[in-house]
Amino acid sequence: MKSNQFSLNANQKSAKGLTAVANLIQSQAASAPPPETVARRAYAIYEKQGSQPGHEVKHWLEAEAQLFGGVERESQMHPGSSLFKTEH
């Protein structure tokens, strides 16, 4: 009987962990910037790094890291610029 009870407790813990992960993913998705914002940021990074092709994925991931990390926000954009202000 003890092994059955142990399995139940382990399953309950797994379910709680999965619920916590699902909640985290949901909250991040709700606060995620739209793809258009990531694309604008990636393009700005591309231009800033000399407009050399072949680094699209790197630029996209860097843009996501900046935006998801809350480093910069679209509402803080320089007037007339595709680059965003940084807060350090």
Image (cartoon, rainbow, N blue to C red):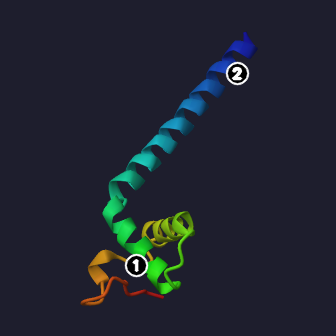
Callout in the foreground (2, 1): 1
Q: Give the CA separation, mark 2 to mark 1.
A: 47 Å
**Element class at badge 2:** helix
Which one is in front, 27 or 59? 59
The quarter of the displayed image where residue 37 is located: bottom left
Q: In the rendering, at what x and y percent does residue 54 appear?
A: 57, 68
- Residue reaching furthest front? 53
At horizontal 49% and vertical 43% (from top left) the residue drawn is 20
Task: Name the mark on residue 72.
Answer: 1
**Element class at badge 1:** loop
Quadrant of the rendering where the N terminus is positioned: top right
Q: In the rendering, at what x and y percent does residue 84 appear?
A: 37, 83
- Label 1 near label 2: C-beta < 8 Å? no
How many neighbours does mark 2 have within 10 angstroms: few (below 14), some (14-19), or many (20 or more)? Answer: few
Q: In the rendering, at what x and y percent does residue 82 appear?
A: 33, 82
Task: Name the mark on residue 48.
Answer: none
Give the residue at mark 2.
6
At horizontal 45% and vertical 66% (from top left) the residue drawn is 68
What's under tag 1, amino acid-wise?
Answer: Glu
How many neighbours does mark 1 have within 10 angstroms: few (below 14), some (14-19), or many (20 or more)? Answer: some
Give the answer, above or below, for where 24 lies relative to 34. Answer: above
What's under tag 2, amino acid-wise?
Answer: Phe
At horizontal 60% and vertical 32% (from top left) the residue drawn is 13
